[in-house]
Image: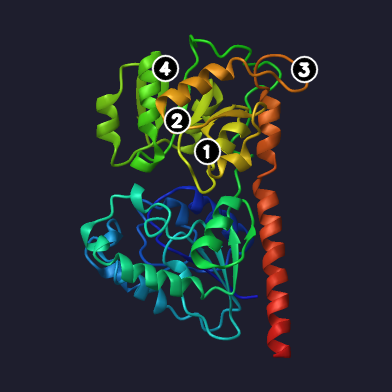
Amino acid sequence: MKIAFVYDRVNKIGGAERVLVALHEIWPDAPLYTAVYNPETALWAKDFKIIPSFLQKFPFAKTHHELYPWLTPLAFETFDFTGFDIVISITSAEAKGIITKPGTLHICYCLTPTRYLWNGYQDYHVPMIVRSMMTKLRIWDQIASQRPDYYFAISETVKQRIWKYYRRKSEVIFPPVDTTKFVIRNPKSERYSSFSRPTSNFYLVVSRLVSYKQIDLAIEAFNKLDWPLKIVGVGREMNKLRAMAKPNIEFLGQLTDKELLGYYKKCQAVIFPQEEDFGLVPLEAQACGKPVIAYRGGGALETIIEGKTGIFFKEQTAESLLEALGEMGKTSLQDKGEKGFRPEDCRKQAEKFSQEIFKKKFKQKIEEEWKKYKTNISTS
């Protein structure tokens, strides 16, 4: 099988990019087509064969793709996939809009239907030029959503959205967490028997600092508690969040995976206040043996075992988060009746989403769909 990948833009690092790295390990010779490529901010892609679109030559396109909303769909439609058996689009935006010829199977691994057009419209600071074209962009997105031959979804949450907005069926394949990189420190000695006021331990937030991540409510809660909170990540909300935070809250900026691992291992628990399509942070935390305090919504419901590897709060408010922080101290282990969360339980849950499991299932499903596709072509 000759395979190609397509991704919206190669200019950052996040959960989707980790998926691409895992897919590259399965099919190392597959080229990666994308709207724009910024090698300075996408070091993970240095081993890929990157094929950017004509947008690569446009001013500021590598860093501000939102300046060209009317050209990005065209950029993907102009790619030529002649000679490929399978094209896999990994996308939360325009990459699914590629056009393939009969004989080429297009499988979309959907991160979510285009967020700023549909379910996340109210949460995004959409430029005025994009708002003025919203209806046309939604029409194109609907048309583009019918082009893949088959859909995979990253979670049940996304599966429901694909049906709601695109009326397409899909199958869930959870993204992978690197359980060889994110590891537990010492499962026999680590025990969180009390979640009262911490002394040396701290709580941790790992997130891009943008409005829909709801990091402000975590800051509000910890401002009231005066407990230590460390925040990993950067984003356009950085200055606003810094201004509202008291001295007990520390902003660490962007860290390497090695640096992040150290904070995961030492923290008391990870705070996850946003509603995500899937969310790798809770799994990275659990892989390190740490429980998660998460908003009851989105992908977190599929990765956290309530009362065993974490606890949920009902509303995206500081008050609701404060209640969950208090409740965590009352939660008992299901098997021993002791207060706390066992690191080994958290680790066991994360291992269900390992890279090896992901790669095995993804490869198997691609081969199955290719076999069915060839059969359908030969009999039609």
- Residue at the spot of label 4: 228
- Which amino acid lies under the numbered mark 1 shown in the image of this protein? Val
Q: CA distance from mark 2 to mark 1?
A: 9 Å
> Could you tell me which quadrant the C terminus lies in?
bottom right
- Say which label, 3 or 2, has the lower sequence index: 2
Q: Residues within 10 Å of mark 1 (few under 14, many from 20)?
A: many
Residue 182, picture quadrant: top right
In the picture, measured across the screen, residue 193 lies left or right of residue 4, that is right
Residue at which label 1 appears: 281
Is 186 above or below relative to 232?
above
Inspect this view and state whether residue 210 appears.
Answer: no
Q: Position of residue 115 (x, y in %)?
A: 41, 56
Mark toward the viewer: 3 or 2: 3
Mark 4: few/some/many CA within 10 Å (<14, 14-19, 20+): many
Residue occupying the point 21% across, 58% down = 128
Residue that mark 3 sits on: 336
Q: Residues within 10 Å of mark 2 (few under 14, many from 20)?
A: many
Instruction: Write down the quadrant of residue 131 in the picture.
Output: bottom left
Assign a secondary structure to mark 1: helix
Estimate how packed mark 3 is, as few (under 14), some (14 to 19) or many (20 or more) residues with alpha carbons within 10 Å: few
